[in-house]
Image (tube, rainbow, N blue to C red):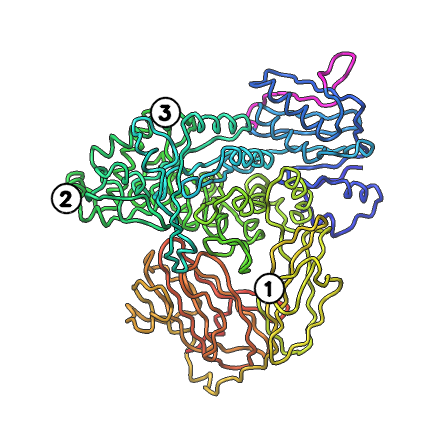
Amino acid sequence: MKLDLRIPFSMLLAVGLAATTAHAAAADVPALIPMPASLTMDAGNFHPGKTLHVSVEGRLGDRRAITALASDVLREAWHRPVGRATTHAPADLRLVLAPAAGSDPESYTLQVTKRGIVIRAANDAGLFYGLQTLRQIATPDSDARAGIPALHIADQPRFRYRGLMLDSARHMQPLAAIKQQLDVMARYKFNTFHWHISDDQGWRLEIKRYPKLATISSMRKETLVGNANQGAKVRDGIPYGGYYTQAQAREIVAYARARYIEVIPEIDMPGHMVAALAAYPELACTPGPFEVMTTWGVADDILCPSEQTFQFVEGVLTEVMEVFPSAVIHVGGDEAPITRWKQSALAQDIIKREGLKDEHALQGWFLRRIEAFVRAHGRRIIGWDEILEGGASQTATVMSWRGMQGGIEAARLGHDVVMSPTSYVYLDYCQSRSPDEPRCIGGNLPLHKVYDFEPVPDGLSAEQAAHIIGGQGNLWTEYLKTPQTQQYMLFPRSLALAEVLWSPKGARDWNGFVQRLPAQLAELDRLHVSYRIPEVQGLDGDRASLDPHLMLPLGSLLPDARIVYTLDGSAPDAASPRYETPLQLTLGDTPVQVAARLLLPDGRLGPTQRARFSFTTLHAARPAPAAALAPGLQRDYYEVGVARTDALLAATPKRSDVADAIAIPADARAEQFGLRYRGYADVPDDGIYHFVLASDDGARVYIDDALVVDRDGPQSPGTTSGDIGLARGLHTFELRYFQGGGDRELRLQVGREGQQAAAIPAAWWRH
């Protein structure tokens, strides 16, 4: 009997299958990440013999490497000798190169029968990915007596660009750590390594034409201690720096190429160049002197668009292109303040001479000139989405990081696009709101939100959507000093991203992914990867209850883990009570703070999750007659730069109107503005209401003058929730919001106890 797994994995396990053979097949379904495009389970198993044999058919580009990988996979799985197939020793594993017109260059088929295993592909890359899938079927240290199940896989990637970015400018990584990351990337079918090797805080690549980039620009005298977004000012007083020689960079390129990963270097320009200016101040619009930055953020000092600057950039890129054979070169283009160009006579003369509109157009002119140089060397450029603001060349690829809108605009203009929005794939963002998490830049990007990432947004035509060539996760390292902390942020979130970028959209299934994840975490253990153990499920936020007796169920994504907990908020340890059945909480005048974490069989403890559970009563409705009120909320729009929502109270609105939904107005400017919504919420029934606020930057929600949700201050994209008991009727409502810079978001949802939060109906709002 055959079992077709093109239906969602969780549906397969949930519905139950009548036939015994189907039950057996379901139990044998390999825990594959990313999920293949098509997987059909067949009857029977392949059982390895005492010696295994491999054959390779077709003209491979690197027969030796593919054969060696195949032998390693079989040897790791069953610890049997592996040799070359002959007429007297038929192949247990056949690798067949069979070019087919129109086939995806990374596609493959994999078939397991009682007689053996066959992987077919159009080229070497397909065979390589087929072997990575086989590695997850015939897992290391497999039971040879059980063998592996018969099956057929037909697979190809959804996107041709599947990337991870590593920032080596803020904190460097040893070559061994970079190679380990490349090893894991290859196993999960990533094919692009974006290497960020220059920034304000350090220059990391040897450039022989400009030796002071290594001796001066690579070193900062000290580093900020604490989180800059939270006002940290103290430095550690410890010099930090270093760089990669060109020989070392070539070593990384070759190592990646052997794993079918392209390395794209990034030399950010014209901004994020303070480290270079420290060595070559003549490239700036002001005389300097400059020093390599010791804190994080954006500097006003950028490259001046002089002929001397172009000579420098072209000299640097000439050597970069000699080291990195990638088809594209990343030129940054992000976060380049125009302050110095506004003050520069040279910059203003160029604007006048070239007939440019403004300084943003000057940046476009700057980058188009650089692109012409790069194209003359047979390459193309890729840049962050700010490159659109100055009129990017049609051949430039746009990497959309400030949300999805830049990518949408680029696709409509005919640019190829890599989606890399902060709200889904900035893997330096915190993984929970627990204060016990390692220091991170901010935000809240849990595993499930990465899995929710959809690179192709609604509203694009088929032709425009074809320009979305893939997506990328970014790991900025301001707060990630060691390979271990970097791996903690990368994994398992990058496994979720791997499935987003490889598997068909219709095959993605969160419950199925969660069921397949434990097997992959076991493999990361074997590879000595310092991944983050998943948190306990059920403590997503503080909750209020009208009942003093509350039953609290908790859950785990890992079936072999135990949950340990405390009821006083202290961090549980191995000796803490173990969760067996839902907790029975008695709520009184003082909230109960539940803390819980996973305890693995080997004694490791996961991150601590906490939530406060409070007894509450209903806020009485206000006496204002609903008939005397008009629909909607009063909305004030401010064009001011603030860092706290309370600052809006002293500002004068630029305009005021009435809105029937809470959202950023379509005509709001990109940055430095605020909103204030005021009126009444006409609540339909008595109950506990759970409000979920998504914002970037800061926002607060007040109901009946009580602060219900607090996301004040500079924020990365994320959500915060709060509960309040409300009687049926009118309740005063106010929401304050400000946008600083970068990505922006504002959304408020509500749900009753036990219900999913959803958009608030327009009928609620009165003023």
- With 456 as the anchor, is 647 left or right in this view? left
According to the picture, the residue beneath numbered tag 2 turns out to be 345
Determine the main secondary structure of the stretch shown in magenta: loop
Q: Which residues are magenta?
A: 83-103
Give the amino acid type for the residue marked by disc 3 in the picture: Gly
How far apart, in angstroms, are the residues tagged by discs 2 and 3?
34 Å
- On whether residue 88 falls in the magenta region, the answer is yes
The residue lying furthest to the right in this view is 20
Give the amino acid type for the residue marked by disc 2 in the picture: Ala
According to the picture, the residue beneath numbered tag 3 turns out to be 378
Provide the secondary structure element on which disc 3 rests.
loop
As drawn, 149 above or below 568: above
Name which of mark 2 and mark 3 comes first in the sequence.
Answer: 2
Question: What is the crowding at mark 2: few (fewer than 14 residues within 10 Å), some, or many (at least 20)?
Answer: few
Name which of mark 2 and mark 1 comes first in the sequence.
Answer: 2
Q: Nearer the viewer, mark 2 or mark 1?
A: 1
As drawn, 199 above or below 699: above
